[in-house]
Amino acid sequence: MSKPFDTTLRFLLENYPQDWLRLAGFTPHGPVRVIDANLTNVAVEADKVFLIEEESPWILHLELQASYDAELPERSLVYSVLLHRRHGVPVRSIVVLLRPEADGLVMSDERAMSFRGEPPYLQFRYRTIRVWQLSVDEILENGMGTLPLAPITDFGVLNPELVIHRMKERLQQTAATPQSDSLWTSTYVLMGLRFDEAVADSLLEGVRSMQKSVTYQAIVATTRVEGRVEGRVEGERQALFTLGTKNFGAPPESIRLRIEAIRDWQTVDRLVGRLTDISRWEELFEE
């Protein structure tokens, strides 16, 4: 998940899980519960994991991405296996690409592993949802929790005034004021994926009540902090990879995943300092 938008997406996923399942094409016949996505045995965390408590329970794993990541399919495979191992139920994995910049050749709905000239010995299938290709009509008719995606579809980018107008009509008909304010807040933040800030401000000028919302203040403040912190974390992480690779070669997959899972720059900075005290990657996390 793109870090500057974590807070907004987390709010929508945790408060409207049924709507996200419907967006993915599922109509659950039992309660939907958000469950722990922290897979501590490899120090990684999936974006959001839902347990669908039907007669035959299953898990929906959603991975949201705003920028291109060639390793996302393989990482989703790892999450799927670990979630199945932990909970003992089947896992469906869905990758949600939030904008065209996140797409690429590897996003093929399958990750296969094989030896040259031999059939695959492992095949992992997942589904990719490209938000910009979604039908605005379907989003507007779906639940409230996915409504803020409408302006960042291709139709929304080409016809933003029309989409915002239709969103206003939908929210006036079905949403209470506090809920409406929170959803406009989420819309404003997500529009940053495809609109300049000034354009988003202009388009939402008639929805200024959201700025009085506690949710608005909290999400926007946290988003700004996350953006600054993530930038510093990424800088420290790149320094760690560059210096470590120079000394020890490319890091093993397990080490790389642990490093990429770290969210505070102080921890990464401490690991950079440890590079002078170790002789191989495997010693990095040993105290």
Image (spheres, grey):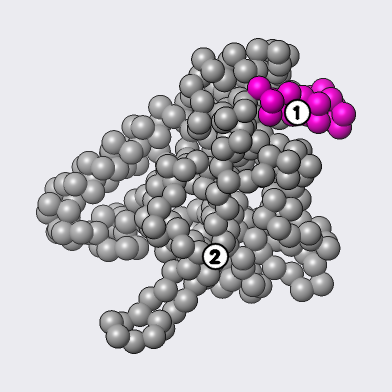
The x, y position of residue 208, in whole percent, is 69, 13
- At x 29%, y 36%, the residue is 235
Residue 263 or residue 160, whichever sits in front: 160
Label 2, residues with CA under 10 Å away: few <14, some 14-19, many ≥20: some
Range of the magenta residues? 161-180
The x, y position of residue 184, in whole percent, is 69, 25
According to the picture, the residue beneath numbered tag 2 turns out to be: 126
Give the answer, above or below, for where 130 lies relative to 51: above
Q: Quadrant of residue 101?
A: top left
Looking at the rendered structure, the kind of residue marked 2 is Tyr
Disc number lying in front (1 or 2): 1
- At x 59%, y 13%, the residue is 202
**Residue 59 within the segment the image draws in magenta:** no
Q: Quadrant of residue 172?
A: top right
Q: For the residues marked 1 and 2, what is the alpha-carbon distance in whole angstroms?
A: 32 Å
Give the answer, above or below, for where 129 lies relative to 225: below
Do we see residue 59 in this rendering? yes
- At x 64%, y 72%, the residue is 90
**Residue that protrudes farthest toward the left in the picture:** 247
Query: Where is the C terminus found, in terms of image quarters?
Result: bottom left
The x, y position of residue 275, in whole percent, is 18, 49
- Residue 6: give its label: none
Ranked by sequence position, the earlier of labels 1 and 2 is 2
According to the picture, the residue beneath numbered tag 1 turns out to be: 166
**Residue 165 within the segment the image draws in magenta:** yes
SS state under label 2: loop
Looking at the rendered structure, the kind of residue marked 1 is Arg
Residue 229 or residue 171, whichever sits in front: 171
